[in-house]
Amino acid sequence: MNKLAFIALLVLVAGCTGGYQTPSEEARQDAAGEIEQQEMANETAQQNTTPQEPLVEQNRTQQEQQPPETVTYTVLADDNGFYREDGTRISSITIAQTKAKIKFKTTEDVYYGGLDFKSAKFNSPKVPPQSEWTSPEFEMDTDFEVKSYWPSSGVLKAVLTVKANQS
């Protein structure tokens, strides 16, 4: 009988607290759930729009900070002058970029001692026949001349005018 009384007591207690909600409690929970969902939707919308502005600004800053590209110009040289790669003789070149290098390629028509290339922007070591030397990078802010010399005697062989494109 003790068992039966205990079970009856359990059923009675469970029935009284069995999770029955009054309409006012149910309405309050529904309203709280809707408010919570609306707040989550607002937070998601803010997260999707807020970071875009700083990213655009960050990209602009990175682009502005990137240094200009350095361009290398190739010039052939021998004891008689300077030439384009196609063999056309030239007395000047025009450089449009702010940072540049010049690659000098000597031909077989160079004195056995090679050539030196001297300018206000750079001076080369002796460049033997049929070889090449690339100048260090320089700022193309003004026109200047590159002169080729025989290294052993210092005899001037040719002059190349390098012009800054003022556009």
Image (cartoon, grey):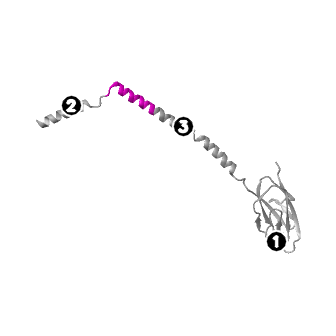
| Crowd rating for badge 3 (residues with CA inside 10 Å; few <14, some 14–19, many 20+) | few
What residue is shown at x 20% (from left), y 32% (from top)?
Answer: 11
Residue 96 part of the magenta-drawn span: no
Q: Which residue is mark 2?
A: 12
The percent position of residue 156, horizontal first and vertical second, equals: 89, 68
Q: Is residue 53 left or right of residue 115?
A: left
What kind of secondary structure does the magenta stretch mostly adopt?
Answer: helix
What residue is shown at x 13% (from left), y 35% (from top)?
Answer: 4
Q: Which residue is mark 1?
A: 114
Question: Which residue is at the front of the view, 119 or 74?
Answer: 119
What residue is shown at x 21% (from left), y 31% (from top)?
Answer: 12
| Crowd rating for badge 1 (residues with CA inside 10 Å; few <14, some 14–19, many 20+) | many
**Mark 2 in CB contact with mark 1 (< 8 angstroms):** no
User: Between marks 3 and 2, how big is the CA–CA gap?
Assistant: 51 Å
What residue is shown at x 24% (from left), y 30% (from top)?
Answer: 15
SS type, badge 1: loop
- Residue 79, labelled with which disc? none
Q: Amino acid at mark 3?
A: Gln
User: Between marks 3 and 1, how big is the CA–CA gap?
Assistant: 69 Å
Q: Amino acid at mark 1?
A: Gly
**Front of the two marks 3 and 2:** 2
Q: Amino acid at mark 2?
A: Leu
- Residue 46, labelled with which disc? 3
In the figure, 125 relative to 39: above or below? below
User: Between marks 2 and 1, how big is the CA–CA gap?
Assistant: 112 Å
Specify which label sits upstream in the sequence, 3 or 1: 3
Specify which label sits upstream in the sequence, 3 or 2: 2
Residues rendered magenta in the picture: 21-36
Residue 33 part of the magenta-drawn span: yes
The percent position of residue 119, horizontal first and vertical second, equals: 83, 63
